[in-house]
């Protein structure tokens, strides 16, 4: 992801590994294994992981439930092509749609691919039901992936001018400004698309009231509400889906990251009335493959087990309280986010990238989405002892000038 690549680029040690395309500057270590909140490198050093593959490993490293599902399913059936039904795909589709309160699902391999599907579905719906409307209003600072269309949908200033020409039809509005959305809607508009909390741009929440106003506006103007819950979904904010906090129901939702707990899985969900793909419109070699469906189902069962999400809320409250204490101690800008998707606003400090570098040297994996913020996305089953260990390390790093 860019947000780590760009920050670390300035300080990372040289020595790119020549056989790999250098898509990011990596520090000169190689990880060999992990367990829960810990990772070990080839020299035997341990690191406390508060990045977890960028909010991906929701159950931590090497979770037994995933290992079991992979072993059992891989010995039965990996893939029989999306041209056929398979049992795990059908079982998981029922479970995930029931949990989300959306009637239909298409399984994909990455978040960007799920978002591409969402954009296609909305455009087709617009062609059929809204006089050919095809524009999708998206937000400044939003992040939706790295394919051509999803880069164009993203509101990342650093990408301006890259891979031109952009895919057309993604007018941008500032986040949390309902008037700006209202003004941006025209006859060409088919949908509004956003993250309930902008993750990559630094953990910037859409207000609950704003999300409710968007839902009402979409209904009034006859357009779709698309929520990109790739980072916020699957328990990350303490509810299975972040939209639950605001009590809105999206027309289309995308999931990724935590949905596979570290394995490549994503999903596009939609209300029945919106599902207008005809055979041939959408597909992909690996969609709904039995292996990933079995893993996804096992992950969903873990996340919805009795007490799991309550514990996420509890851990999130502990982490927030302790970060707020640090913020007060060092005169920083406070904490934002929800559940276990939190950022410490470093302002007036702007040494976030240097702090990440020092944290790595101290055995702590942290992310700075911007020079003035640190992002915390531990495993959802992070322990209080791990939170205390992280806070101790961070306190030591902030102490030094
Ligand atoms: C990570 C992310 C994506 C892209 O997912 P990939 O699996 O990397 O393609 C899209 N939207 C949001 C909100 C994300 O956090």
Image: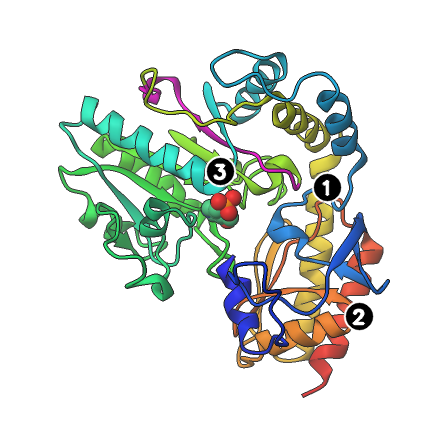
**C-alpha span from label 3 to label 1:** 21 Å
Q: Quadrant of the C terminus?
A: bottom right
At x 66%, y 23%, the residue is: 294
Tag 1 near tag 2, CB within 8 Å: no
Front position in the image: 112 or 141: 112
Q: Which residue is mark 1?
A: 59
The structure's colour scheme is rainbow
| Residue 367 versus residue 147 in the image, above or below | below
Please report whichever mark, 3 or 1, sits nearer to the chain's N-terminal start. 1
Q: Residue furthest bottom?
A: 401
Judged by depth in the image, the label closer to the viewer, 2 or 3, is 2
Front position in the image: 277 or 400: 277
At x 32%, y 61%, the residue is: 162
Label 1: which secondary element: loop
Residue 392 tag number: 2
Q: Which residue is mark 3?
A: 243
- Determine whether, in the image, residue 5 is placed left or right of residue 87: left
Q: Position of residue 168 (x, y in %)?
A: 22, 47
Q: Position of residue 356 (x, y in %)?
A: 64, 71
Q: Quadrant of residue 301?
A: top right
Judged by depth in the image, the label closer to the viewer, 1 or 2, is 1
Query: What is the magenta range?
Result: 262-277
Please report whichever mark, 1 or 2, sits nearer to the chain's N-terminal start. 1
């Amino acid at each position: 992801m860019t947000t780590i690549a760009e920050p670390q680029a300035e300080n990372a040690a040289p020595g790119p590994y020549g056989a790999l395309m250098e898509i990011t500057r990596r520090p000169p270590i190689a990880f060999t294994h992990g367990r829960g909140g810990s990772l070990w490198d080839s020299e035997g050093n341990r690191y406390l992981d508060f990045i977890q593959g960028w909010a991906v490993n929701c159950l931590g490293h090497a979770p037994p439930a995933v290992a079991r599902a992979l072993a059992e399913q891989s010995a039965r059936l990996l893939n029989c092509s999306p041209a056929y039904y398979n049992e795990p795909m059908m079982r998981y589709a029922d479970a995930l749609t029931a949990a989300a309160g959306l009637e239909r699902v298409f399984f994909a391999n990455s978040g960007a691919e799920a978002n591409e599907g969402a954009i296609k579905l909305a455009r087709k719906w617009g062609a059929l039901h809204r006089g050919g409307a095809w524009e999708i209003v998206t937000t400044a600072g939003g992040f939706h992936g790295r394919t051509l269309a999803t880069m164009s949908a993203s509101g990342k200033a650093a990408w301006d001018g890259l891979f031109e020409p952009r895919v057309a039809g993604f007018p941008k509005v500032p986040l949390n400004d309902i008037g700006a959305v209202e003004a941006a809607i025209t006859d060409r508009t088919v949908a509004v698309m956003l993250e309930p909390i902008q993750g990559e741009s630094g953990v910037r929440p859409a207000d609950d009231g704003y999300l409710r106003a968007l839902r009402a506006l979409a209904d009034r103007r006859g357009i779709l509400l698309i929520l990109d819950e790739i980072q916020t979904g699957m328990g990350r904010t303490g509810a299975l889906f972040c939209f639950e906090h605001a009590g809105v129901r999206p027309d289309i939702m995308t999931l990724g990251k935590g949905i596979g707990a570290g394995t490549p899985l994503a999903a596009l969900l939609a209300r029945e009335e919106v599902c207008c793909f005809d055979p041939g419109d959408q597909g992909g070699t690996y969609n709904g493959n039995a292996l990933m469906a079995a893993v996804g189902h096992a992950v969903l069962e873990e996340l919805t087990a009795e007490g799991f999400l309550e514990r996420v809320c509890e851990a999130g409250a502990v982490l927030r309280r302790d970060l707020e204490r640090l913020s007060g101690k060092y005169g920083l800008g406070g904490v934002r986010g929800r559940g276990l998707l939190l950022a410490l606003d470093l302002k007036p400090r702007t040494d976030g990238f240097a702090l990440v570098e020092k944290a790595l040297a101290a055995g702590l994996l942290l992310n700075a989405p911007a020079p003035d913020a640190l992002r915390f996305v531990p495993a959802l089953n992070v322990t209080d002892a791990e939170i205390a260990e992280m806070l101790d390390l961070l306190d030591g790093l902030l102490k030094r000038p």
